[in-house]
Amino acid sequence: MIPNTYRSQAQIWPLVLSENETVPCGNEKVTASRFFTFAFSVDTPATFPYDGGVLHGNLWVSSPAGGIQVRLESNLNATGEGREMATNLNARMIKIVLPNMIGYERIAMASVASFARLHGFAADRIEDLKTVVSEAAINAMQHGNRGRPDAEVNIAFTYREEAIQVAVMDEGDGFKDTLSKPDIDRIMNNLDPPIGFGVYLIRELVDEVEFDIETDRGHGLRMVIRK
Amino acid sequence: MQHNNEIKLEKQGEVTIFDIRGDLTSFSETSLNEAYQKTSDQDARRILLKIEADAYINSGGIALLIQLMAQIKRNNQFVVITGISEHFKKIFNMVGITKFAKIYDTMEAALEELVAESA
């Protein structure tokens, strides 16, 4: 029988888990799926409550070299009757904390592109995702965090029901979507400033968007892109 | 963090080619303005913007491109674009850039059309 709660007093895991690599997790073993392709180290122990066939886990990883933190919150699908507790990491959510510095949005773009590829998104939708994640992150850095170097941008990708949900949170006061579509004729004639393209692209490229959500991690936006 | 962007100017007949290497973001402002200033000093009338297919272009870069095209229009010059990916063709169409600069799949087609349109 599998206990209702399965806990790993996990040791610090190996620096890099390659695909299908099996690593110890308490007294059991866990097989890393393709999600562990980053050269990050797991720097805190992991605990996996077991709940009716699915192990829910939280893995914290961080880059030893930079200010980037990546947290994978994984559902660990137990195989068979779970006697071996050999499981595949089946990541459904990735969280990234970016420094408030223009350019680092590319980290989020690369991550969401990898995440979408793993979940079978077509190339054109991945490009859409990259663009909207980039624009949302830039808005968070420039407008939400007002360029403050000590601020952070929290980004979470979740895969559910053939769609990726992206939440981009900053430390600002929130954003009301009151910008109208940029009018290129007026911009070309110097009647309007050349602004508003980022929000416009987000609205056009995603299937759902909310521009003013609030969580314990701050204010931000939530958007959904379907396959 | 590095923001690589370089623009090489080339002449091909009466066409001035902006060979844009790297990304188009708000950090491209200086290189784009300098390139356009040189072009204007040479009294160029026909401009081809060659953008790399894997370039990262964000809203800051789009805004700069539109400002550049506004200058080009005011100075009665002609401009076309080539090289960009299908994704950014779609984006350029969405934001209206293609109302002022057609996009061509190849350099040859762009040059041919540029010469024909401005003749």
Image: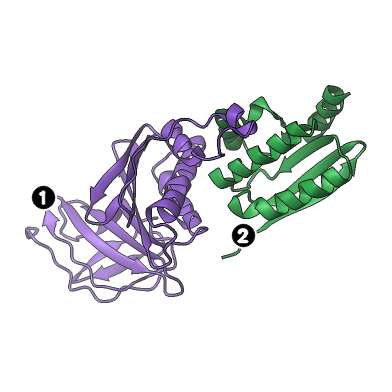
Is A81 displayed left or right of B25 in the figure?
left
Residue A42, label in figure = none
In the rendered image, the residue lying farthest to the right is B13
Residue A150 in sight in this render:
yes
Query: How far from the left and from the top, in percent, is residue A158?
Result: 31, 46
Q: Quadrant of residue B97?
A: top right
Q: Is residue A201 above or below residue B26?
A: above
Nearer the observer, B102 or A175 = A175
Q: Chain of mark 1?
A: A
Are the residues flagged by discs 1 and 2 in contact, CB closer than 8 Å?
no
Q: Chain of mark 2?
A: B
Q: Quadrant of the N terminus of chain B?
A: bottom right
Q: According to the image, label 1 marks what residue?
A: A52
Residue B3, label in figure = 2
Query: How far from the left and from the top, in percent, is residue B7?
Result: 75, 52
Q: CA distance from mark 1 to mark 2?
A: 49 Å
> Which residue is found at the position 19% from the left and 51% from the top?
A80
Question: How many other residues sit within 10 Å of disc 1, few (<14), some (14-19) or many (≥20)?
Answer: few
Of all chains in the rendering, the one displayed in green is B
Q: Is residue A151 above or below residue A124?
A: below
Nearer the observer, B52 or A40 = B52
Query: How far from the left and from the top, in percent, is residue B37?
Result: 79, 48
Q: Secondary structure at mark 1?
A: loop
Q: Secondary structure at mark 2?
A: loop
Look at the image and give the colour of chain A: purple
Residue A91 in sight in this render:
no
Nearer the observer, A98 or B38 = B38
> Which residue is found at the position 68% from the left and 28% from the top?
B100
Amino acid type shown at disc 2 = His
Amino acid type shown at disc 1 = Gly
Query: How far from the left and from the top, in percent, is residue B20?
Result: 73, 48
